[in-house]
């Protein structure tokens, strides 16, 4: 794929995301997309560069519409998988340090290869479960999560990693049913979080029901969190 095509896709984003990325940043994003296409171990079904520019890169960069992400200096990407949104944000925010949290060894190795290939020096791979990453406790200005799991699970993973005043940005659809919303609100309150915004975004033409759910950490998370690995999914809060 030509770099001009990627530049057009990135610069076509709405609102505050319409920032000028340097030629070097565009080149880095192009290398990331080429790695997705070329690496048979890439952990995503979307590997075609033209499509991945929208589905992965543009979708990730919608977070730049949010000041808590644009101004963050320490960002953790939960369940990073193929590296989105974390790798795209690392390229767009060179002054920030991005931790790519991924528990599966093969995916960690893929992330390390991509960062090395694209020269992304401000991203590091944390090969651990979120609940077991003790170095990250209370250390992040923002936590981002894309297709990680049910809301209460994502909230429980994120809250201990955020400093007070930090924000979780969770990629998902429109707000759920009343009982789902109640469970999410209950879990958030228990963890010291509160949802402050649901922003509809359109990362590419034809995208439907794409929303960024933003939670603010109001107070310290109780010391019983994080629970041991697996408990957030086995016994989700708010249920």
Image (cartoon, helix red, strand yellow):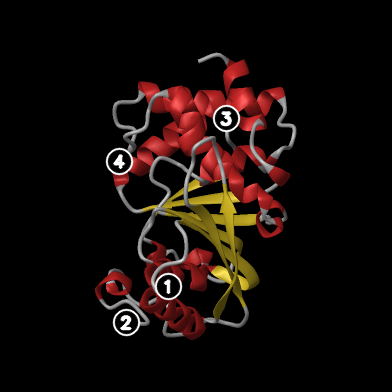
The quarter holding residue 142 reads bottom right
Nearer to us: label 1 or label 4? 1
Residue at numbered disc 2: 239
Q: Earlier in the sequence, mark 2 or mark 3?
A: 3
For label 4, the SS is: helix
Q: Earlier in the sequence, mark 3 or mark 1?
A: 3
Q: Residue at x 62, y 37 (%)?
A: 91
Residue at numbered disc 3: 119
For label 3, the SS is: loop
For label 1, the SS is: helix
Nearer to us: label 2 or label 4? 2
Residue at numbered disc 1: 156
The quarter of the rendered structure image containing the C terminus is bottom left
Residue at numbered disc 4: 106
Q: Residues within 10 Å of mark 1 (few under 14, many from 20)?
A: many
Q: Residue at x 62, y 80 (%)?
A: 218
User: Which is more toward the observer, 169 or 77?
Assistant: 169
Q: Residues within 10 Å of mark 4 (few under 14, many from 20)?
A: some
> Label 2 vs label 4: CA separation?
33 Å
């Amino acid at each position: 794929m030509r770099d001009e095509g990627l530049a057009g896709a990135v610069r076509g984003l709405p609102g505050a995301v319409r920032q000028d990325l340097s030629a070097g940043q565009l080149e880095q994003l192009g290398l990331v997309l080429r790695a997705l296409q070329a690496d048979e171990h890439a952990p995503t079904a979307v590997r075609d560069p033209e499509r991945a520019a929208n589905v992965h890169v543009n979708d990730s960069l919608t977070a730049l519409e949010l000041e808590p992400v644009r101004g963050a200096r320490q960002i953790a990407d939960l369940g990073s998988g193929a590296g989105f949104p974390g790798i795209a944000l690392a390229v767009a925010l060179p002054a920030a340090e991005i931790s790519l949290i991924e528990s599966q060894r093969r995916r960690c190795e893929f992330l390390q290869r991509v960062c090395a290939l694209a020269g992304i020096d401000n991203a590091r791979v944390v090969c651990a479960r979120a609940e077991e990453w003790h170095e990250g406790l209370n250390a992040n200005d923002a936590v981002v999560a894309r297709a990680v799991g049910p809301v209460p699970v994502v909230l429980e993973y994120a809250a201990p990693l955020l400093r007070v005043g930090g924000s979780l940005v969770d990629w998902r659809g429109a707000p759920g049913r009343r009982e789902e919303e109640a469970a999410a609100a209950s879990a958030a309150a228990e963890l010291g979080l509160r949802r402050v915004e649901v922003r509809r975004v359109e990362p590419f033409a034809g995208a439907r029901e794409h929303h960024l759910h933003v939670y603010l950490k109001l107070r310290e998370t109780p010391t019983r969190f994080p629970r041991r690995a697996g408990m957030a999914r086995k016994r989700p809060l708010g249920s």
